[in-house]
Image (cartoon, coloured by chain):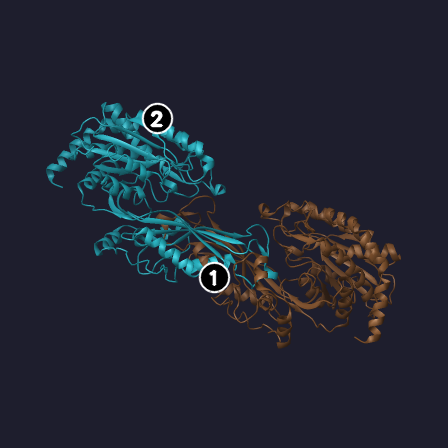
Chain colours: A cyan, B brown
């Protein structure tokens, strides 16, 4: 960055004081509104919450309207999409913001300190399901827009907001929506805040994500549970068989044994490994954080490398037979396991699922009915950190957080990033305001109140920096 | 058997007509009373049913009284034992009858055609939890005694009845009771009906049983469920680890791989293998019976041999993580499995559990907390089929069923048989009136009405045959 540019930045930074002041003054009100958002149990995986999901969409629509957008709820075959936009100057770039208003199921409920849909602030943290993933982060962008709209009377650049309700269940209807609304959604760049800062006070821009494939394997043995004494030894036990089939998927070195699993893996460059190695990382601190006694994973890679850039094969849940109090001497009639594999560039989801299915099927003993149900999947994502958009975003983050972000990858999957690239032809800026210790997908999910506020500032600055870029005239 | 003995038998058989006629006339009433017995949900494994178990004990006490015994309910630290006796002639042998009034948990409830504790007769079968295991079979002995008492005014021989309420949860307090009441329980032989006929119209005397050990293995990983994207690859997943640890316990040939597992196994004799081979057994019929697509088990042995005289290692149930509708991308914080091994002579329960624990512990990855909880266990049992008691019982069965019984083993475990041998010094006659297709421990458990009736006749004849034996004068 040249000295001239630095001066320009400096002037612009000062120019943001009015918007920043407004956001700071309005913080308590913004927090109240976020709590209202979080009180709606928009669990997309469970059909019992269908009405709440619908109600949540309406909340988002109203918040968009308050931020100066023209907004509507668009039905899909699943949960609705909320879309809002303001296009006011064709010479300015157009920014497409994506987020999701649906949340993970809250169970196990008994491990929450306070109820998941009764938001409460303790020690500077706002606790609720969806606090950071992704309602809290979505809300920073809406509040930042609102600040521009109120303080300046107009939004910087042209803005499009796409907030969906099926992210936690695979975004099944999003791709169809994108394909059906290519022109309406046309933009220069996308912005998503569904990732994390690198650490306490270390903001980050995420330039890579892992992909995912998910499947459920079901084994059916005898037509009913059998007495393990009378029948034990004569037919395959579905529970034993399932452990055998799944147990061999990872070897003692933490390496996945599915044939061909690593064939397409794009290895990290020496430069990336060096860059990751420079990031502060405390193994003991990490273990305290997750409450685990030791690290375990593929040998030959650091913990960050294994989490960000190496593929995995995890059982997410399994059940068979009797799991209540006391013994029950049966051969269960069936067994089930849910499995996900995290993918890295350039693994192909369908190929991985084919290999997983073949590997499991091959080791299924005779007499069992083998079923393999595929769920959502997406490729991994990585883009060039020297892009002009990344630089602009980096400047905005530096302004809001007081220091420049580091460039990292993340282990999670955001399939929409790939869809934006493939269908809309745009790159995505991944700006995470939260932290990976915020208990995403776990009991006691939370969002630091300070992060929420910094997020609104970062977002407000981001609109200005991005609006200063050269528009492609696509919107 | 000599010609003289045959004539003697014939005369005695004719002598039983009065008792047999009574039992036949009274069958509808006996069935009604059995239904009353079955309506009491005496589930010993679940403390929610404690009151029902107590109520069931009282039912048994009253039935004993009706059969001419002096009966009482004796509390234990768990569920009570019901004990009744009638000692009227020191020169006659004393017979100790054992059974249990507790039942297995009825779940999964949705697989029952009619509710488990609402007994109903369909197609000549009485459906209810406990119908055959063991309430129905216990009741045949009580009804047979009652018939003797009513028709003849006195019982044949001296009779002791011990009916416990903790058989399905390991008979935790029975051994202490036996040790504390050695003199009171002194007898010449024990009788238990908790096994099965060999097949349709093929009565059997069971001369061997498998033993059992039970354990629960629990793994604890991170302190809470973690996001599988953010954390996947960095720490051991308890669900994956459990499948790996358990999955390797049985090899592709169905052989248990626990080191030393087969060291103490008493192999079947050539004569036994030949005898088993002569028994009618249809593999296709067996597979239809259990609703399974193929046989699977330790290679080198027939299906009957594997079920009766080879040890096993079965998962009875397991659970980890999310098992509800839709995907949930987590690393579960914990995983649990219940395991039982069926034992054959001369395997030692403690040695098997030690080996199982060591084998599992050894393959537990770092960072997981490993817990191994031992439950009940007992050795296998086998006794000499040329004993005088066996011959007497065989004659009684032949009289009631119209044909002599075959001599078989069974795969289940009846720990009390070993306790009777070790503590009271007596052998046990295992006379099963039910069938192994009666869905013991499964939904739709039932007892053929005809088997119930034949059982009462067999029992009535048994008392006479046993009473004709030489008493040891121990009672």
> For mark 1, what is the residue?
A365
Label 2: element kind: helix
The 10 Å Cα crowd at callout 2, few under 14, some 14 to 19, many 20 or more, is: some
The quadrant in which residue B201 appears is bottom right
Q: Quadrant of the C terminus of chain B?
A: bottom right
Residue A62 seen in render: yes
Q: Which residue is mark 2?
A: A62
Pick the front one: A442 or B116? B116
Side (left or right) of B264 relative to B227: right
Q: Position of residue B103 (x, y in %)?
A: 66, 52
Q: Nearer the viewer, mark 2 or mark 1?
A: 1
Residue A14 % position (x, y)? 19, 30
**Label 2 and label 1 in one chain:** yes
Q: Chain of mark 1?
A: A
Residue A226 is situated, as x and y percent measured from the top left of the image, at 58, 56
Q: Are marks 2 and 1 in contact (CB under 8 Å)?
A: no
Q: Which quadrant does the N terminus of chain B fall into?
A: bottom right
Q: Which label's residue is closer to the chain start, 2 or 1? A: 2
State the residue in front, B278 or B73: B278
Q: On screen, B19 above or below A186?
A: below
Residue B361: percent from the left, percent from the top?
A: 48, 62
Q: Quadrant of residue B408?
A: bottom right
Front-most of residues A39 and B207: B207
Secondary structure beneath dot 1 equals loop
Q: Is residue B207 left or right of residue A69?
A: right
Specify the subunit that label 2 lies on. A
């Amino acid at each position: 960055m040249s000295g001239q540019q630095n001066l320009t930045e400096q002037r612009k930074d000062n120019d943001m004081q009015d918007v920043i002041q407004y956001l700071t003054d309005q913080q308590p009100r913004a927090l109240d509104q976020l709590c209202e958002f979080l009180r709606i149990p928009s669990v997309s995986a469970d059909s019992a919450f269908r009405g709440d999901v619908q109600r949540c969409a309406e909340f988002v629509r109203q918040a968009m309207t308050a931020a100066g957008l023209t907004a509507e709820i668009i039905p899909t075959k699943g949960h609705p999409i909320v879309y809002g936009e303001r296009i006011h100057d064709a010479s300015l770039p157009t920014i497409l913001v994506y987020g999701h208003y649906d949340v993970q199921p809250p169970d196990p409920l008994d491990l929450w300190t306070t109820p998941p849909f009764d938001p409460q602030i303790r020690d500077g943290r706002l606790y609720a399901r969806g606090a950071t993933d992704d309602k809290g982060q979505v809300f920073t962008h809406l509040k930042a827009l609102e600040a521009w709209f109120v303080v300046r009377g107009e939004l910087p650049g042209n803005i499009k907001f796409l907030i969906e309700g099926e992210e936690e269940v695979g975004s099944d209807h999003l791709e169809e929506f994108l394909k059906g609304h290519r022109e309406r959604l046309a933009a220069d760049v996308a912005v998503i805040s569904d990732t994390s800062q690198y650490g306490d006070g270390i903001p980050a821009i995420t330039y890579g994500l892992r992909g995912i494939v998910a499947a459920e394997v079901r084994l059916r043995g005898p037509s009913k549970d059998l007495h393990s004494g009378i029948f034990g030894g004569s037919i395959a036990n579905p529970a034993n068989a399932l452990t055998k089939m799944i147990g061999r998927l990872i070897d003692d070195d933490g390496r996945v044994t599915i044939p061909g699993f690593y064939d397409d893996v794009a290895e990290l460059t020496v430069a990336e490994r060096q860059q990751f190695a420079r990031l502060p990382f405390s193994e003991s601190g990490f273990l305290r954080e997750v409450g685990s006694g030791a690290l375990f994973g593929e040998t030959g890679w650091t913990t960050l490398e294994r989490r960000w850039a190496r593929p995995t094969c995890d059982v997410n849940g399994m059940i068979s037979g009797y799991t209540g109090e006391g013994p029950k001497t049966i051969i269960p009639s069936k067994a089930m396991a849910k499995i996900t594999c995290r993918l890295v560039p350039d693994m192909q989801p369908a190929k991985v699922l084919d290999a997983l299915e073949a590997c499991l099927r091959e080791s299924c003993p005779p007499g069992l009915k083998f079923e393999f149900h595929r769920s959502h999947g997406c490729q991994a994502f990585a883009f060039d950190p020297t892009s002009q958009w990344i630089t602009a975003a980096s400047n905005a983050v530096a302004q809001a957080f007081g220091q420049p972000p580091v460039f990292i990858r993340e282990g999670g999957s955001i399939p929409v990033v790939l869809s934006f690239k493939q269908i809309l032809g745009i790159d995505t800026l991944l700006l995470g305001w939260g932290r990976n210790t915020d208990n995403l997908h776990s009991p006691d999910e939370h969002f630091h109140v300070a992060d929420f506020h910094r997020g609104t500032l970062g977002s407000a600055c981001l609109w200005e920096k991005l609006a200063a870029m050269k528009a492609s005239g696509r919107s």
